[in-house]
Amino acid sequence: MQYRFLTALKKEEAKNKAKGKREGDMYDNMSAGELVLHENIQENPVLFLVNFLASVIYRFKH
């Protein structure tokens, strides 16, 4: 699940970069619910190892 989240986030960042937008604009345009979900997924200390493993797998595959 974390890997799919990371992949979707990277695709969204690439799409915004192609449009000439910066990363901050992507977060400014997110709804409050998306921001809370993103924060909980990224900053939850329980999920630290899962997030780390997902980022290693993402970097290995891409």
Image: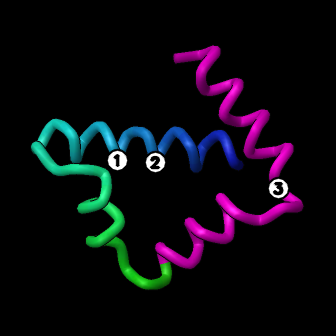
Badge 1 element: helix
Asked if labels 1 and 2 touch by Cβ distance under 8 angstroms, the answer is yes
Amino acid marked by disc 3: Leu
Badge 2 element: helix
Measured in 3D between alpha carbons, the distance from the residue under mark 2 to the one under mark 1, in whole angstroms, is 5 Å
Find residue 34 and report its horizontal and vertical position in percent.
47, 74
Q: Is residue 14 magenta?
A: no
Q: Is residue 24 left or right of residue 45?
A: left
Measured in 3D between alpha carbons, the distance from the residue under mark 3 to the one under mark 2, in whole angstroms, is 17 Å
Amino acid marked by disc 1: Glu
Kindly report which numbered mark, 3 or 1, lies closer to the viewer in this rendering.
Answer: 3
Q: Is residue 2 left or right of residue 38?
A: right
* Farthest residue, direction left: 20
Sequence-first disc among 3 and 1 = 1
Residue at figure coordinates x 24%, y 42% from the top left? 15
Residue at figure coordinates x 77%, y 65% from the top left? 44
Which mark identifies residue 9? 2
Amino acid marked by disc 2: Leu
Residue at figure coordinates x 21%, y 40% from the top left? 17
Sequence-first disc among 3 and 2 = 2
Q: Is residue 28 left or right of residue 42?
A: left
Image label count: 3
Residue at figure coordinates x 76%, y 38% from the top left? 52
Q: Residue 36 falls in which quadrant of the image?
A: bottom right
Question: Which residue is under mark 1?
Answer: 12
Q: Residue 18 falls in which quadrant of the image?
A: top left
Question: Which residue is under mark 3?
Answer: 47
